[in-house]
Image (cartoon, rainbow, N blue to C red):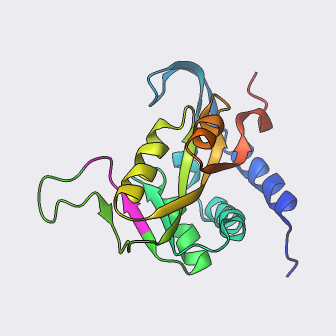
Amino acid sequence: MQVKNTEELRRELIELLSEMDVVQRGKFILSSGRESDYYVDIKRAVTEPAVLDVIARLIADAAGEVDRIAGPALGAVPIATAVSLYSRKPLLMIRKEKKGYGTSKLIEGDLQKGDRVAVVEDVTTTGGSLLKAVRAIQENGGIVEKAFVIVDREEGAVDEFKREGITLIPLLSVSDFNHS
């Protein structure tokens, strides 16, 4: 079996996502509250094993030395799970808010003080949702130096993370797709 390099995997991911028409045209309200004439539907794509396999390899190889892989609910959980399986690093799932029953945890999984955590997300616009998950990890003793996103909409997330001292690494950007 031939081992693919990062650029070959990126091209494969673009091809897979393009075949699935992940960039949809229309009028959409994004989680950032912004209105957009296109939507990047990664959630459907990450239900496909071939897509998850490529994503897991790209992120696990680029994550470097980390102790945990984390993803905010809902869209990033399958991504984080795939990366966790591929890298053999334990998984953390970050809730949007503490649940009001049971253990009332915001973070599911075993996060220890000082753990280095790579956080993954499906799509970023401004980065606000992902930063909320990062802050939850930091407030619970984790260290986040890198975060990964499958598709960055190129609307400020990378710069916002840079201001926070965290490297946001998009596997792809919306400009990698012909959406005009």
Which residue is located at x 51 percent, y 63 percent? 80
- The image shows residue 168, relative to residue 61, as above or below, that is above
Q: Where is residue 81 in the image (x, y as percent from the top left)?
A: 50, 68
Q: What stretch is highlighted in magenta?
A: 92-97
- The image shows residue 125, relative to residue 34, as above or below, that is below
Q: In which quarter of the image is the N terminus?
A: bottom right
12 part of magenta stretch:
no
Quadrant in which residue 155 is drawn = top right
Position of 62 with respect to 130 (left or right) is right
Q: Position of residue 175 (x, y in %)?
A: 77, 33
Quadrant in which residue 109 is drawn = bottom left
Quadrant in which residue 22 is drawn = top right
Q: Position of residue 84 (x, y in %)?
A: 53, 73
Which residue is located at x 35 percent, y 56 percent? 139
- Using the image as rendered, state which of residue 13 and residue 135 is in the foreground: 135
Q: Position of residue 98 (x, y in %)?
A: 22, 52
On the question of residue 74 being in view, the answer is no
On the question of residue 96 being in view, the answer is yes
Position of 63 with respect to 98 (left or right) is right
Position of 89 with respect to 94 (left or right) is right
Which residue is located at x 47 percent, y 44 percent? 131
Which residue is located at x 76 percent, y 21 percent? 180
Position of 41 with respect to 132 (left or right) is right
In this rendering, the count of numbered labels is 0
- Using the image as rendered, state which of residue 64 and residue 36 is in the foreground: 64
